[in-house]
Image (tube, rainbow, N blue to C red):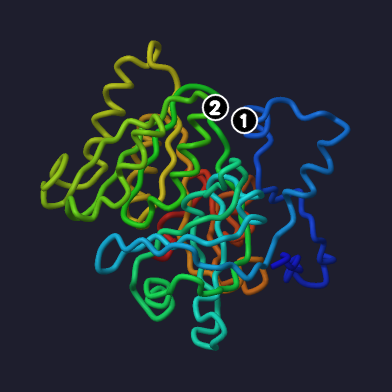
Amino acid sequence: PAPRLAHSLAGPHRPAPLVSFRRGPLHPAWLTRLRGPIAPRRSLAHVILREMLADVDARVVENRRLSSDYNVLVFHAPSIAAAAAPGQFVMIKTAGAGDMPLLRRPFSIFEITRDRAGAPAGMSILNKKIGTGTSQLYDAPIDAVLAVLGPLGRPFAPPESGEAWMVAGGVGLGPFVTLAEALTRAATPATLFYGARTAADLHCADLFPPLGAELIVSTEDGSRGDRGFITGPLQRALEAAEHNREGAGEVTIYVCGPTPMMRAVAALAARFSRTCIVSLEQVMGCGLGGCYSCVVKVRQPDRPRFVRSCIDGPVFDASAVVWEELAH
């Protein structure tokens, strides 16, 4: 089906443009690194096309059950796939044609699927069955049609130099497949630190080594990798890099997962003076800035302010987040 352009819900003070350059889905550095310099004559049109949000009736083409509560749901959604950048998300009406739950649910864009010619054909999400909406997505049949809005939010910015370390816990793995692919194309060395409760919970870990990312894992029960939290191996890696800082170069840390884990990683990054970028997992009602359900307190030059994570995020500099006031 042809995509429907989404309208802004930001209110009368913002005249509902279809294009917003402030929250562009593709960081200019990704364009330069991944596609080469853009010809001036077509750069504006290229950016405008990529900025358009699409609300599409997306067909489920695959439902990969990973466990009794995790699955990967793949949608045919070429317009969203073509516009998506690493770290962005979609809002999905999980009930299909039904009414419950009323509000959509936010999900990181997990993978971009391609057709035989290599053109973007769809996208997937990593889902954990918890409540009504996520249970509907776990049980979604092939050929089911769901309303999917996106791509939304600020994406990850690529590191200016050095290595990229991704730190994931549970469904926090969601934004990192697309980031790992982009890092590979940009020839940026990458490592994934992945923590879970048991070895069986390290879902989709095998996707990353083929993308060129080194894989370091930990489990709380010690069934694979280190016993304990993923912050243990991350701290050792930071200590080793600190001892060889001149030779090793810069490290940028990207993290997504439970709030306590992200806060702990942010503290480690600050201790070792490393840049840390977090992808927050806030509750969202609309994804477009209209409902203010996802506000986050961040430090700004004059004073701390509340911002909407769906527009100003979900990607933030970890040092700007007021962690003690962030809901878990």
From the viewer's perspective, is 286 left or right of 138? Answer: right
Q: If the image is split into quadrants, where does the C terminus sit?
A: bottom left
Q: Residues within 10 Å of mark 1 (few under 14, many from 20)?
A: some
Residue 130 lies in what quarter of the image? Answer: bottom left
The answer to whether 187 is drawn above or below residue 16 in the figure is above
User: Could you say where residue 116 lies in the image, as x and y percent from the top left?
Assistant: 56, 44
Which circle marks residue 186 in the picture? 2
Q: Looking at numbered disc 1 in the image, what kind of residue is underneath it? A: Leu
Q: Residue at x 77, y 44 (%)?
A: 47
- Callouts 2 and 1 close, C-beta under 8 Å: yes
Q: Residue at x 74, y 68 (%)?
A: 4
From the viewer's perspective, is 23 left or right of 245? Answer: right
Figure disc tally: 2
Q: Looking at numbered disc 2 in the image, what kind of residue is underneath it? A: Ala
User: Could you say where residue 321 lies in the image, as x and y percent from the top left?
Assistant: 49, 51
The answer to whether 86 is drawn above or below residue 2 in the figure is above
Q: If the image is split into quadrants, where does the N terminus sit?
A: bottom right
Earlier residue among tags 2 and 1: 1
From the viewer's perspective, is 240 left or right of 59? Answer: left
Residue behind mark 1: 34
Residue 325 lies in what quarter of the image? Answer: bottom left
